[in-house]
């Protein structure tokens, strides 16, 4: 049973436009969410997080939005750059402190 | 500060063999977690070690085991390898266990079982 779901395996976006990556979760007890970015042949790197007491967190070009009633979060990248091409993972710590990851979305930034 | 290192980076084994993977966390980090990444399943939590004790375990068979040493370095072992064990094995370290969710990942060990 996938508690963190990223339903889009891949996404292509024109350079300079907005990239929106989506994530849904099923466990209403999740109260903290993270986004990781992964390049080929490298481990994931932490990108941005959000606590359930907020509905938005911004860091430079990256903004994460949380809609608790819909159990949905999204990562916005504006403007998208070639270096943003990577796999993005949404994750949440469970009540027993295991980090539950989604399956990832591969983002392609087109020139 | 040096990052998380994993050795070896690539490994090819045959079914039935066993394998040991190594992870050196960032200096000062005491928690080490292991994940398996496969194309179909994404990242799946294997286990977490903190102060030489297994603190948490994912839903993997007993063929998967690990340990942590006093210097926080960790090893994971997979016995009686199966074809389905082919994956990227990632190690992540963090300062402490539990609430420190910002983990730092190593580059992974790519295991191929033939």
Image (cartoon, rainbow, N blue to C red):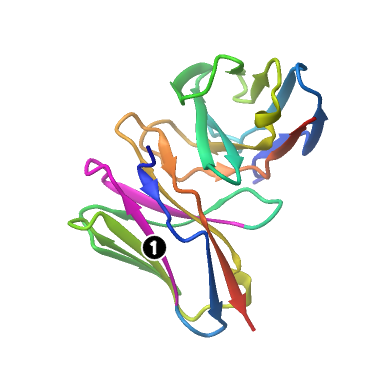
Q: Residue furthest left?
A: A69
Would you say residue A28 sits in the magenta stretch?
yes
Q: SS for tag 1?
A: strand
A94 relative to A33, above or below: above
Q: Residues within 10 Å of mark 1 (few under 14, many from 20)?
A: many
Would you say residue A24 sits in the magenta stretch?
yes
Residue shown at the point (40%, 33%) measured from the top left: A98
Residue shown at the point (65%, 44%) measured from the top left: B3
Q: Chain of mark 1?
A: A
Left/right of residue B13 with respect to residue B48 in the rendered view: right
Q: Main secondary structure of the magenta part?
A: strand
* Residue B7 lies in quadrant: top right
Q: x, y percentage for residue A53?
A: 20, 54
A63 relative to A52, above or below: below
Left/right of residue A6 with respect to residue B15 in the rendered view: left
Q: x, y percentage for residue B34?
A: 56, 31
Question: Which residue is identified by label 1?
Answer: A22
Left/right of residue A94 with respect to residue B20 in the rendered view: left
Quarter of the picture containing the C terminus of chain A is bottom right
**In the rendered structure, which segment of residues is drawn in magenta?**
A19-38
Residue shown at the point (54%, 34%) measured from the top left: B29
B93 relative to A36, above or below: above
């Amino acid at each position: 049973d996938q508690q963190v779901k990223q339903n889009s395996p891949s996404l292509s976006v024109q350079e300079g436009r907005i990239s929106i990556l989506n994530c849904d979760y099923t466990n209403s007890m999740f109260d903290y969410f993270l986004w990781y970015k992964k390049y080929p042949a490298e481990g994931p790197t932490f990108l941005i997080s959000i606590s359930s007491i907020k509905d938005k967190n911004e860091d430079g070009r990256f903004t994460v939005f949380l809609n608790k009633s819909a159990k949905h979060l999204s990562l916005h990248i504006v403007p998208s750059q070639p270096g943003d091409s990577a796999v993005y993972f949404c994750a949440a710590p469970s009540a027993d402190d295991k980090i539950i990851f989604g399956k990832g979305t591969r983002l392609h930034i087109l020139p | 500060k040096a990052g998380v290192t994993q050795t070896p980076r690539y490994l090819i084994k045959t079914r039935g063999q066993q394998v040991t993977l190594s992870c050196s966390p960032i200096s000062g980090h005491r928690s080490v977690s292991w994940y398996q990444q496969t194309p179909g399943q994404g990242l799946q939590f294997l286990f977490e070690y903190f102060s030489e004790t297994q603190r948490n375990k994912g839903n993997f068979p007993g063929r998967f085991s690990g340990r942590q040493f006093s210097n926080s370095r960790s090893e994971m072992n997979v016995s009686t390898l199966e074809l389905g064990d082919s994956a990227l094995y990632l190690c992540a370290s963090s300062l402490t266990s539990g609430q420190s969710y910002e983990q730092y990942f190593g580059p992974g060990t790519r295991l191929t079982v033939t």
